[in-house]
Amino acid sequence: MTIQERIDQSETRITMTVFPFLTNHHDTLFGGKAMAMMDEVSFMCGTRFCRKQLVTVSTDKIDFHKAIPSGSIVEAVARVESVGRTSLKIFVEIFLESMYKDGREMAIQGRFTFVALDDDKKPIPVLEGLDVN
């Protein structure tokens, strides 16, 4: 399998409904909940890519382009963007859609970096032991 095929197969999506208990005092999705969703979907994507233990080591700029109101459907999409020796950078977008109208728009985007670890919690090569060409 090529690295590109592995990237394509590891793309991960999660969808949820924004209920009132997930919102702030403006009745929009709490930013911390959005960031947690992004971290979770990027973790799943990275794990599917390399099948190794991963930990989040950093996030790049997270841009909140559009507020997400209560009663919306959101989908988080994560895709491996680059592969280092012991790390993966994963790009995440959250899309917003109304429950009762067609269409969707990108609302939030950001990048998360993960490091692969061995059983002793030491960094290990991401691609080592994988069948990649």
Image (spheres, rainbow, N blue to C red):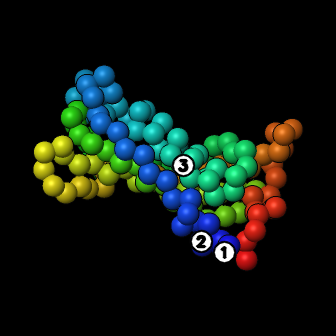
Choose the circle earlier in sequence order: 2 or 3: 2
Of 13 and 105, the residue lying toward us: 13
Choose the circle earlier in sequence order: 3 or 1: 1
Of 25 and 12, the residue lying toward us: 12
Residue position for label 1: 2
Give the amino acid at mark 1. Thr
* Picture coordinates of residue 116, whole percent (x, y): 74, 49
Rounded to the nearest whole Å, what is the CA distance between mark 2 and mark 3? 17 Å
Give the amino acid at mark 3. Ser
Secondary structure state at the residue bearing disc 1: loop
Q: Classify 41 as above or below 86.
A: above
The quadrant of the rendering that contains the C terminus is: bottom right
Rounded to the nearest whole Å, what is the CA distance between mark 2 and mark 1? 5 Å
Please report the residue visible at 82 percent of the width from the left and 53 percent of the height from the top: 124
Q: Classify 53 as above or below 132.
A: above
Q: Is residue 30 left or right of residue 89?
A: left
Residue position for label 2: 5
Residue position for label 3: 42
Secondary structure state at the residue bearing disc 3: helix
